[in-house]
Amino acid sequence: MRPRKLMNQINVVPYVDVMMVLLVIFMVTAPLATPGLVELPSIGKASQPPAAPLEVVIRADTSLILRERPAGKDGGASLERSVSNAQLIAALREKQAKNPDQPVVIAADKDVRYEAVLKVMDELQRNNVRRVGLLVRPAGK
């Protein structure tokens, strides 16, 4: 009896056949798959420029100033006036009655206690003043 020889080769023909069948299957089914359509929103040109935000400035002594900047890129002189809480609410509600999308930002001095800022925000929220945000300065400026 002869001893068997070890076989140290791999027959790759069946693997190539399987890969060719898979390639044909993918080539046939790829055109049949419908890609998902993404419907992007369209916008028209704005009929009017966005309103410049009204700024509620809280100074270090917790006094309030209402600053109105004119709309447009040319800027112009801003109108500032000292106001009490009641005058502030009345002025903001009047402006938002004319323009419901009128944004309001709170600009507080960095030395103002956080409690004073929250007090003003709470007062605005209780009186249904919409679109309130905080004005910050980017770091490094």
Image (cartoon, rainbow, N blue to C red):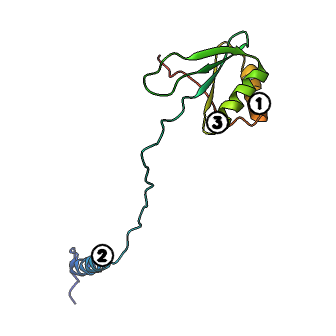
Task: Specify the quadrant of the image occupied by residue 63.
Answer: top right
Label 3, secondary structure: give it.
helix
| Dot label at residue 98 | 3
Which of pointers 2 and 3 indicates the residue nearer the eye? 3
Task: Specify the quadrant of the image occupied by residue 119.
Answer: top right
At label 3, the amino acid type is Lys
Inter-mark Cα distance, 3 to 1: 23 Å
Q: Quadrant of the N terminus?
A: bottom left
Task: Specify the quadrant of the image occupied by residue 19.
Answer: bottom left
Q: Earlier in the sequence, mark 3 or mark 1?
A: 3
Q: Earlier in the sequence, mark 1 or mark 2?
A: 2
133 left or right, relative to 125: left
Q: Read off the residue under disc 2.
A: 31
Inter-mark Cα distance, 2 to 3: 55 Å
Q: Is residue 50 above or below residue 120?
A: below
Q: Please report contact status of discs 3 and 1: CB closer than 8 Å, yes or no.
A: no
Label 2, secondary structure: give it.
loop
